[in-house]
Image (spheres, grey):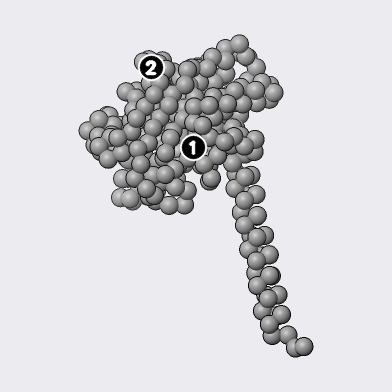
Amino acid sequence: MFYWFLRFLALGPLIKLIFRPWAEGTENVPKEGAAILASNHLSYSDWLFMPVVIPRRVTFVAKAEYFETPGVKGWFQKTFFSGAGQVPIDRSSGSAAAGAIAAQLKLLNQGEICGIYPEGTRSHDGKLYRGRTGVARIALEAGVPVIPVAVINSDVIAPPGKVFGTLARPGVRFGKPLDFSRYEGLQDDRYILRAITDEIMYEIMRLSGQEYVDLYAQDAKKRDRDAERESARVAARAEADEVWDEIKPD
């Protein structure tokens, strides 16, 4: 009930009033039945813009910590995230990835729509990175279609590392549903999972217009951080050499 309050009476109308999000391909989202919305991930605000442009509830999984904080703050936090369509990851299986899959399978088996970010984390530079195969495993185990989604301009509104950037009009493109029933029963074949995931990422790339990098986003972030550190080290060494050249005795 609180989800629909936020969606239609509180948060949703406010988002529409301020940002005026546009949408394309909403007819590709089924009016009933389970489905996966597999989206690019440019900003922490993505989960606000995607659900607000379609009439159905979209559920994401979130860190259990959002639901377990004690006290009044914890109650408000839990109420907000629950009402905004997020469910905690069940870590009883021993890993966050397995817990996320279990939570999403449960929701899909109930006929709901799940939102998934195959990249696993936000893009730090606006590029689209290699997808994790969890989305393929969930699609095969649940036997549901995957709808590729591209969120546009959310990284302008809330860039990586910032709470707010520049006011812009965000957009959401929904692609045609992808049917992977031909791979039924092959959810343990890693080559099949990779092929399915790559097909999903290709469609997201086509919808978003992003440059694709065949590297996991987390690895790319580490690579770029290491490159920045090395560049800073070289610059510092060059500056020290210049100072030494100025003060060294003839």
Q: Which mark is residue 7?
A: none
Residue labelled with disc 2: 27
Looking at the rendered structure, the secondary structure element under dot 2 is: helix
The residue sitting at the left extreme is 9
Q: Is residue 9 left or right of residue 140?
A: left
Q: How many marks?
A: 2
Q: Position of residue 245 (x, y in %)?
A: 71, 80
Instruction: Give the quarter of the image for residue 220.
Output: top right
Q: Residues within 10 Å of mark 1 (few under 14, many from 20)?
A: many
**Closest to the observer: 15 or 192?**
15
Q: Position of residue 140 (x, y in %)?
A: 57, 18
Q: Is residue 137 above or below residue 69?
A: above
The residue sitting at the top extreme is 182
User: The N terminus lies in which quarter of the figure?
Assistant: top left
Q: Residues within 10 Å of mark 2 (few under 14, many from 20)?
A: few
Q: Is residue 158 left or right of residue 238?
A: left
User: The C terminus lies in which quarter of the figure?
Assistant: bottom right
**Closest to the observer: 90 or 225?**
225
The residue sitting at the right extreme is 250
Residue labelled with disc 1: 41
Looking at the rendered structure, the secondary structure element under dot 1 is: loop
